[in-house]
Image (tube, grey):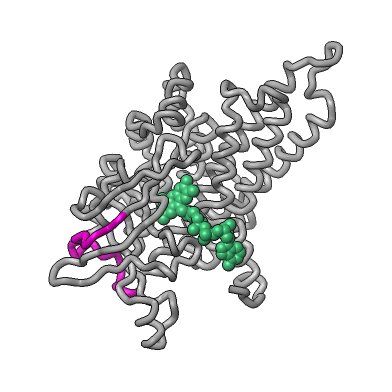
């Protein structure tokens, strides 16, 4: 069969289930947004509803308590949540971690973690970034040393989202230092290992970082001082965590693109609703002026194109295609979607004139959210570097 762009019935069901679930929150939307934006309080009730409609179980096979609906289903769910004005922030990290456990974890880890993820009882976060090793992950200093049945982990992590509400974090540390790897003639990617760390472990100090993005969640700098982690919590092979880590970064990028698509929908709706009503000269709504209408129409056209590559990336992941191929689509989708989200929100602000800056429209909050996704979880520049190197075969400058 040739190309088929129809979504399966279960995909439509996920979409409708999420829409239906969000309806219940419609009367309390402002209160919930204030709670997330100003108090940065985690919306536990919403999380439990994500679980009830099956979102926490999408990437978990049935034998481990999930529904196995896949990444495309979850991406559609993310689009709906964000279009509805909410954030799936911690669900993004929990899902990417669960994908990594599923692909690289031991049978015992799958049985211990995945059912708790699927039913919503455990939340996960992800800790890779360090103060002196941001984009350049391989420069990380956090070290894990084996000591009998445990690893002792020491170092620092930066910008770790939701570690205060998560039960476990998937943490990346060096079991071989960069210098040792070089002495052994190994590549710099050698020596990283992944650990499932109980966030309440002794020896973890969490210092909040005030950040103006990521609603309902706080970022933390972590100071780890000989944190004891049972050896059975090592995910995948010691020293070969880099490839295991990439198994979670592809879904993260695809889901981020889904979030951006939801932002585009929400911004476009606000802009169009306002442009139909607002009259400034005579009785002509501002939406009749092409200076207002054309940028919105352009966003609409691009939205469809970005949706196609995003769904293609999710489909490629679900089909189990080679991670490098999935990575190409995932990167491209995230790149285009983040740019479009910023553009959509910016045009919505433009359409609202002065009201674009008023708190009641929430557009500036949306702009911050969209702008964040240009930089994190992977920056626009690093995606261009990836495509230049891996898809075009150009030499690396760094
Ligand atoms: C709200 C928020 C939440 C986050 N949540 C998490 C989390 O949960 N877990 C986690 O581990 N991390 C998290 N991060 C960290 C995030 O992933 C990083 O901030 C991001 O990857 C960029 O790293 P950096 O900040 O160290 O920037 P740097 O690496 O210092 O880069 C600075 C700038 O230089 C550019 N640059 C660097 N190298 C190159 C190059 N070779 N070519 C071209 N340009 C280059 C980058 O693209 C960037 O624009 C979060 C960050 C934020 C702001």
Magenta-colored span: 223-239
In the drawing, does residue 271 fall left or right of residue 164?
right
Where does the image place residue 33, in percent across and percent down from the top left? 46, 26
Q: Which residue, as the protein is rendered here, is positioned at the far top?
A: 283
Where does the image place residue 238, in percent across and percent down from the top left? 29, 73
User: Could you tell me which quadrant the N terminus lies in?
Assistant: bottom right
In the drawing, does residue 118 fall left or right of residue 112?
right
Residue at position x 66%, y 31% in the image: 268
Residue 71 in view, yes or no: no
Q: Nearer the viewer, residue 226 or 238?
A: 226
Residue at position x 64%, y 77% in the image: 395
Residue 40 falls inside the magenta stretch: no
Q: Nearer the viewer, residue 4 or 387?
A: 387
Residue at position x 36%, y 57% in the image: 157
Residue 221 in view, yes or no: yes
Residue at position x 40%, y 54% in the image: 158
User: Could you tell me which quadrant the C terminus lies in?
Assistant: bottom right
In the drawing, does residue 116 fall left or right of residue 331?
left
The quadrant holding residue 303 is: top right
């Amino acid at each position: 069969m040739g190309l088929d762009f129809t979504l399966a019935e279960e995909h439509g069901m996920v979409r409708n289930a999420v829409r239906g679930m969000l309806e219940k929150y419609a009367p309390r939307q402002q209160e919930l947004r204030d709670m997330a934006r100003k108090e940065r309080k985690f919306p536990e009730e919403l999380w439990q509803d994500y679980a009830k409609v099956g979102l926490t179980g999408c990437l978990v096979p049935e034998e481990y308590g999930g529904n196995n609906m896949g990444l495309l289903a979850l991406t559609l769910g993310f689009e709906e949540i964000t279009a509805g004005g909410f954030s799936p922030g911690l669900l993004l990290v929990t899902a990417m971690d669960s994908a990594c456990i599923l692909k690289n974890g031991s049978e015992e880890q799958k049985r211990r973690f995945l059912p708790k993820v699927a039913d919503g009882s455990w939340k996960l976060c992800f800790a890779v970034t360090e103060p002196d090793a941001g984009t350049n992950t391989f420069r990380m200093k956090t070290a894990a040393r084996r000591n009998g049945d445990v690893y002792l982990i020491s170092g620092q992590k930066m910008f770790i989202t939701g570690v205060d509400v998560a039960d476990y974090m998937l943490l990346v540390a060096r079991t071989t230092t960069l210098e040792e790897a070089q002495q052994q003639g190994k590549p710099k990617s050698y020596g990283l290992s992944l650990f499932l760390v109980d966030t309440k472990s002794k020896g973890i100090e969490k210092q909040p970082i005030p950040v103006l993005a990521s609603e309902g969640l706080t970022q933390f700098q972590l100071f780890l001082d000989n944190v004891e982690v049972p050896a059975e919590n090592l995910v995948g092979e010691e020293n070969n965590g880099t490839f295991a880590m990439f198994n979670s970064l592809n879904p993260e990028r695809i889901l981020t693109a889904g979030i951006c698509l939801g932002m585009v929908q929400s911004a476009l709706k606000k802009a169009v609703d306002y442009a139909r009503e607002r009259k400034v000269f005579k009785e002509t709504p501002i939406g009749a002026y092409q200076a207002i209408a054309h940028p919105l129409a352009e966003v609409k056209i691009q939205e469809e194109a970005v949706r196609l590559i995003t769904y293609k990336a999710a489909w490629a992941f679900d089909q189990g295609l080679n991670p490098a191929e999935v990575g190409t689509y995932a990167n491209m989708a995230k790149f285009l979607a983040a740019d479009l989200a910023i553009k959509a929100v910016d045009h919505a602000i433009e359409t609202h004139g002065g009201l674009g800056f008023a708190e009641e429209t929430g557009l500036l909050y949306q702009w911050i959210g969209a702008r964040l996704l240009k930089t994190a979880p992977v920056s626009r520049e690093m995606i261009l570097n990836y495509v230049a190197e891996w898809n075009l075969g150009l030499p690396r400058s760094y």
